[in-house]
Image: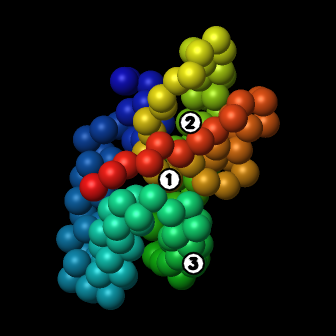
Amino acid sequence: MSEQFEMIMPGDLKENATALAEYCRKEKEKDKEYTQFQTLTDALVEVYRSQSMKRLIEYEIQMDAFYLNASPYLQEIAIHQRKVLLKARNMNWITKLTGLIKDKTTFIAVGVRHLPGENGLITLLQKEGYKVEPVEVKR
């Protein structure tokens, strides 16, 4: 758990929490960027529930477009998300997962943003020779 948390928020926890809280206060006052970010964040729940990889990829494109025009602080967060939270974390997981799933069918649950793209777990597992199939959830 500490390894995962260090990837999410490297450095001093208190400093990071203070910086994030200050950013949220300032952006909420400015409203536009904060509102856009909140709308995109809220939309992820619906994208997840749709069980549509196409919608997930479209969502990631929207997030990237938002970050390109965002404040420097949010751009820094975006770079960290892509580089550390998604790519590095997935590469770390793939070495562990392939050992766990070597001999039998396995269900793996991860955050939805870890699935798509060339560094997504689906592609990485397929490159390792595994067959990846979605599990349909009935509502």
1 or 2: tag closer to the N-terminus: 2
Asked whether, in this view, residue 123 is left or right of residue 83, the answer is: right
Q: Quadrant of residue 39?
A: bottom left
Q: Secondary structure at mark 2?
A: helix
Query: Identity of the amino acid at label 2?
Result: Arg
Vertical arrangement, residue 102 with respect to residue 92, above or below: above
> In front: mark 3 or mark 1?
1
The residue carrying mark 2 is 89
For label 3, count other residues whose C-alpha is less than 10 Å away and answer few (under 14), some (14-19) or many (20+): few
Q: Nearer the viewer, mark 1 or mark 2?
A: 1
Q: Secondary structure at mark 3?
A: helix
**Who is closer to the viewer here, 125 or 16?**
125
- Residue 65 image label: 3
Which one is earlier in the sequence, the residue at label 2 or at label 3? 3
Dot 2 and dot 3 residues touching (CB under 8 Å): no
**Residue 98 visible in the picture:** yes
Question: At 79% from the left edge and 36% from the top edge, which residue is drawn?
Answer: 127
Residue 20 is situated, as x and y percent measured from the top left of the image, at 30, 57
Task: Give the amino acid type for the residue marked by disc 3 in the picture.
Answer: Ala
- Looking at the picture, does residue 87 appear above or below residue 59? above
Q: Given the image, on which type of amino acid does mark 1 rest? A: Arg
Q: Quadrant of the N terminus?
A: top left
Relative placement, left or right, of 1 versus 53 is left
Looking at the image, which residue sits at the far front? 138
Q: Which residue is mark 1?
A: 113
The image position of residue 125, as x and y in percent, is: 69, 34
The percent coordinates of residue 110 (x first, y second) are 45, 39
